[in-house]
Amino acid sequence: MSNNFVIECLDCGKQYPYCPQTNACPTCNSSWGEARYDLFRIGKNLPAMLARRPFNLWRYRELLPLYEYNPAISMGEGGTPLIHAVNLGMMLGCPNIYIKDERQGPTNSFKDRQAAVAIASLKEAGITEAVLASTGNVAISYSAYAARAGVKLWAFLTSLVPAEKMREVAIYGTQVVKVTASYDQAKVVAAEFAKQRGLILERGARTIPSLEAMKTIAYEIVEQITALYSTDDRPAHQQNLPWRSPDWYFQSVSGGLGPLGVLKGFNELKSMGIIKTIPAIANIQAEGCAPMVHAWRQGLEVAEPIHSPRTHIATLATGDPGRTYTLLNQRMRQTGGGVFESVSDDETFRTIHILAKMEGLSVEPAAAVAFAGLIKLARAGLIKPTDTVVVNCTGHTMPVEKIILGDNWARNVVLPSQAMADTPEEGLLAALNRINADRFPRVEIADDMPDARRLIRRILQAQGEYTIYEANDGREAIELAEKELPDLIILDLMMPEIDGFGVLDALKSNPQTNTIPVIVVTAKELTPAENARLQGQIYSLMQKGEFMNDELMDEVRALVK
Ligand SMILES: Cc1ncc(COP(=O)(O)O)c(C=O)c1O
Ligand SMILES: [Zn+2]
């Protein structure tokens, strides 16, 4: 393969050949350019080419800014799975939510795409030393690939980067420079260092391979969604055109390289006639550092920099997005539209628990920001139940950062040494009994629909520690309440045999159960007479389908600790 592509200046339109050392247009000196390919020719052959290749980022190699394909430093980057978020979808009333699991890249973040292509490009040009500034993940990914390629790397990390990430950068042999300042300031220091030493600098959206690498996410999503929604089991490249795109693409945003690249991918796919529509892009920022969100709300073309980010999510602390925001905003307006939204650190940390406990995905705070944004926008009604949504699950930090779990996340079993020596089993049993005695609030869920019970159980378990009992009809609900004396009953009204009203009557007439608080959850529109029947009998009434609000959890927390 020998690729044909050129760089087109975004300011004067001049086309010029790519060379990593060049960072300016030969005509107007602008440092903003973008790669252009012969999309007509590539588009015609793409399905046939894809049929022969494994599912990783290099299957799109004709659309990447490299002259030759050289798999020597590849570690299987790209090709991440698209996972159906069944439980999250049920909670939000949006059944078509899919997670693009970028944690499964070689260093566990979507930055592996960027590093793989960028380092391959440096290697191709014979460059052996490079400089970057990072909030952590870019440095980690680059370090891994630089190590494989024998490129010496200098990483300027803001001091806000968690120590775990700094150590991860160092393990690859990268020269770590900790800058006690903001990320934007660290970028200035790195740029000055690179200039003084004549070294090449990673410049985000202005680094051609970086932006191009990100677009492979769009290509993969389109192939995956197309296969999922086809009526037979065949992969996308065997399906007729046009292929499918999602209605929404969600991503956590710091500098905006990711969404800008992904949008370029969708645009190229449309230019090639492979897809017909471009998704709306939801860019989610951390509230304490959301310059793009502020600009978007005020209808500004240029984002005002944030000088002192106020968020614990250091990974997303780009205070000055510069022209990346301007381009992203313009292109969204010209294509599928979208939004810029922010979420608080607290919402983000809560979302980490929800994702882990409902979907089995442990993610880092920066990745959870996108999901917190999804929950917020779904609640606001912006996402329609029929919409297909893809969320970029951008990354995972190992080990879990302390701030997520607080102090009391483990229980200690201490075996008294004397008891152990005399009667080992007794000592062990006594210790285990102490764990059981560590009692969680006990909640009975009475509903004849298994899905409804499962959803309530998951919502409770995702956000707290509860012992849960389930009853699947009215009679069982009464018997279970009498036997277990739970701290709280969540009760459905419409059940066979004995309905919710009957259950309430039975509970209230038994002195053992008449003080147990009851939350009624129902899909039924109540008549005035039914409403009157519930008066004074229950703690609160909640409509099914409203679980996506925090209301249920607020009520539960108010009743049981
Ligand atoms: C895990 C994670 N998510 C999201 C982002 C945001 O990336 P960007 O806005 O540069 O696309 C980053 C950037 O470092 C990241 O590491
Ligand atoms: Zn120019």
Image (cartoon, rainbow, N blue to C red):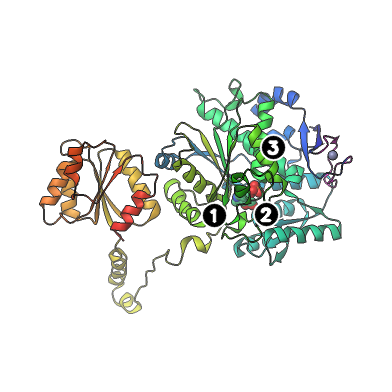
Determine the quadrant in which ligand 2 lies: top right
Q: Which mark is residue 23?
A: none
The quarter of the picture where residue 474 lies is top left
Q: Quadrant of the C terminus?
A: bottom left
Question: From where the camera sits, is residue 54 visible?
Answer: no
Q: Where in the figure is residue 113, as x and y percent of width and height?
A: 67, 44
Question: From which residue to which does the magenta span run?
Answer: 11-27
Residue occupied by mark 2: 305
* Mark 1 neighbour density, 10 Å: few (under 14) some (14–19) many (20 or more): many
Describe residue 146's horizontal placement relative to residue 486 as left or right. Answer: right
Describe residue 222's horizontal placement relative to residue 460 as left or right. Answer: right
Q: Where in the figure is residue 395, as x and y percent of width and height?
A: 58, 50
* Mark 3 neighbour density, 10 Å: few (under 14) some (14–19) many (20 or more): many
Q: Earlier in the sequence, mark 2 or mark 3?
A: 3
Q: Earlier in the sequence, mark 2 or mark 1?
A: 2
Three-letter amino acid code at the position of disc 2: Pro
Closer mark to the observer between disc 2 and disc 3: 2
Closer mark to the observer between disc 2 and disc 1: 2
Q: Where in the figure is residue 224, as x and y percent of width and height?
A: 56, 32
